[in-house]
Image (cartoon, rainbow, N blue to C red):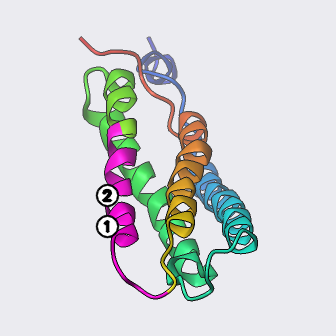
Amino acid sequence: MNEQSTARSAGPARPGGAVVAGGLVATAVVAVALNAAVAAIAHAAGASDDFEQLHFADYALLTVVGVLAGAGGWALVRARAARPARVLRTWIPVILLVTFVPDILLGLSDNPGTSWGAVIALMLMHLVVAAVAVPAFRFLLPLPGDRG
């Protein structure tokens, strides 16, 4: 068997580095754009401009960080787990729920402009990032089959 067929049989083909990098940038851009829509709807529904977490600079940066952290975690599970699909099916919802904890704590605070509507919008932004990122990661970093 030559090197090329060995590489193909080792697992699913992965796009090249430039495609992965470009795909991650595109994923972040789409997630930021959708989160901008969530923020605009939240403000139109009465979320205060004093709620800093719904300012573009704040959520855009954290959206990009979320996409990159998610890609790093996905790549780590992809490389190390014997059953990466099973691990991700379990851990993605768990991690998503954990990311809601600071939002809930924020909702319980007396920070200026904080309302439960604004906090729910913030939580929805976490769901948006996951909804955009997971399918992108499936394409950019396909999972190998279960390893024995």
- Evaluate whether residue 118 shows in this view: yes
Q: Main secondary structure of the magenta part?
A: helix
* The residue stretch that appears in magenta: 94-112
Q: Residue at x 55, y 34 (%)?
A: 138
Q: Residues within 10 Å of mark 1 (few under 14, many from 20)?
A: few
- The question of residue 109 being in magenta is answered with yes
Vertical relation: 108 (above or below) 146: below
Residue assigned mark 1: 105
In front of the other: 6 or 19: 19
Vertical relation: 67 (above or below) 54: above
In the rendered structure, find residue 86 and report the number of the disc placed on it: none
Vertical relation: 23 (above or below) 116: above
- The question of residue 110 being in magenta is answered with yes
123 relative position to 110: left or right? right
Residue assigned mark 2: 101
Q: Quadrant of residue 94?
A: top left
